């Protein structure tokens, strides 16, 4: 009875709070409703089956998945370093690694261009020594998306690592397990929900990336034109097609987030 009474108390929110929450929900829902209202449903298949649309969708999926993989590959060790290691300047490193979350995307693209462009700080040597040119290529799209998406994974995984009970790692080390074995077989399985949630957030951010991509990689159909760039281009020449492409992008992201929300994000809350 006491547990039920506590649960009832938690679910009874003040009316002003509920009213404000409803306004917030409407704030997020109204733009989507506006798109659905103006969508040219009679020509939907024509717009969505267009060759350029399918090409942009394919490039978006390929580049965003690569960006997510790179975010996991480099972001998980970085999150582990920030969560478990004490070193001078750690707060500065954390701020640096999450800076792209608050930077205007165009600024991020400009920064990438002067760092990895053909005459950039590092890009000139990549071009001179290895013949690697990142700007205006699909690889450049992946780099731009990774730059803006990885911080979402770092923050999620670092928070889970900080909440994880260190006694499990200590027990594994006491039994003779190496640090690498403990990390692979104990730590990673324990934070798997957070890792999955962070990867999904990073993928969704990479899929919708626009500013850094168009600045660093350009907007070339069939090469670097992802779906968000195709939406922007269509908005100038064919607004109805832009609406359908926007709805396609929303449907993909929304479907994945809804499908994984209860399964993985709920488990992240349990970890905390």
Image (cartoon, helix red, strand yellow):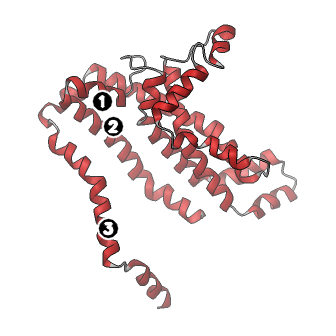
Apparent side of residue 221 relative to residue 141 in the rendered image (left or right): left
Q: Which residue is drawn at 64% across and 37% down?
A: 73
Q: Residue at x 18, y 26 (%)?
A: 46
- Residue position marked by numbered label 2 in the rendering: 249
Real-space Cα distance between discs 3 and 1?
A: 32 Å
Please rate how many residues cluster around mark 1, counting C-alpha atoms within 10 Å: few if below 14, some from 14 to 19, many from 20: many
Q: Residue at x 30, y 77 (%)?
A: 15
Q: Nearer the viewer, residue 224 or 49?
A: 224
- Residue position marked by numbered label 1 in the rendering: 231
- The answer to which quarter of the image holds residue 226 is top left
In the picture, which quadrant includes the C terminus? bottom right
Apparent side of residue 227 relative to residue 243 in the rendered image (left or right): right
Please rate how many residues cluster around mark 3, counting C-alpha atoms within 10 Å: few if below 14, some from 14 to 19, many from 20: few
Residue 190 seen in render: no
Real-space Cα distance between discs 1 and 2?
A: 9 Å
Q: Nearer the viewer, residue 6 or 94?
A: 94
The mark found on residue 18 in the picture is none
Q: Earlier in the sequence, mark 3 or mark 2?
A: 3
The picture places residue 138, in percent across and down from the top left corner, at 48, 20
Q: Nearer the viewer, mark 3 or mark 1?
A: 3
Secondary structure of the residue carrying tag 2 is helix
- Asked whether the beta carbons under mark 1 and mark 2 sit within 8 Å of each other, the answer is yes
Q: Nearer the viewer, mark 1 or mark 2?
A: 1
Q: Which of marks 1 and 2 is nearer the N terminus?
A: 1
Secondary structure of the residue carrying tag 1 is helix
- Residue position marked by numbered label 3 in the rendering: 20
- Asked whether the beta carbons under mark 3 and mark 2 sit within 8 Å of each other, the answer is no
The picture places residue 268, in percent across and down from the top left corner, at 55, 59
Q: Residue at x 14, y 37 (%)?
A: 41
């Amino acid at each position: 009875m006491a547990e039920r009474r506590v649960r009832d108390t938690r679910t009874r929110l003040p009316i002003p709070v509920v009213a404000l929450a409803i306004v917030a929900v409407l704030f997020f829902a109204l733009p989507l409703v506006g798109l659905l209202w103006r969508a040219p449903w009679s020509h939907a298949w024509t717009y969505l089956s267009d060759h350029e649309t399918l090409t942009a969708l394919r490039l978006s999926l390929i580049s965003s998945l690569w960006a997510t993989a790179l975010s996991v590959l480099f972001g998980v060790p970085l999150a582990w370093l920030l969560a478990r290691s004490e070193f001078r300047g750690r707060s500065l490193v954390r701020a640096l690694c999450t800076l792209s979350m608050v930077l205007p995307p165009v600024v991020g693209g400009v920064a990438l261009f002067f760092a990895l462009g053909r005459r950039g700080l590092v890009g000139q040597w990549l071009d001179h020594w290895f013949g690697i040119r990142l700007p205006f290529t699909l690889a450049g799209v992946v780099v731009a998306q990774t730059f803006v998406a990885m911080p979402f994974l770092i923050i999620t995984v670092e928070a889970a690592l900080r909440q994880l009970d260190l006694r499990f790692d200590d027990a594994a080390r006491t039994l003779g397990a190496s640090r690498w074995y403990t990390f692979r077989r104990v730590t990673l399985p324990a934070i798997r929900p957070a890792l999955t949630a962070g990867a999904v957030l990073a993928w969704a951010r990479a899929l919708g990336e626009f500013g850094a991509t168009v600045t660093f990689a350009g907007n070339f159909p069939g090469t670097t034109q992802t779906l968000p760039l195709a939406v922007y281009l269509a908005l100038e020449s064919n607004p109805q097609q832009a609406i359908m492409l926007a709805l396609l992008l929303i449907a993909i992201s929304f479907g994945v987030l809804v499908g994984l929300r209860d399964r993985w994000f709920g488990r992240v809350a349990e970890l905390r």
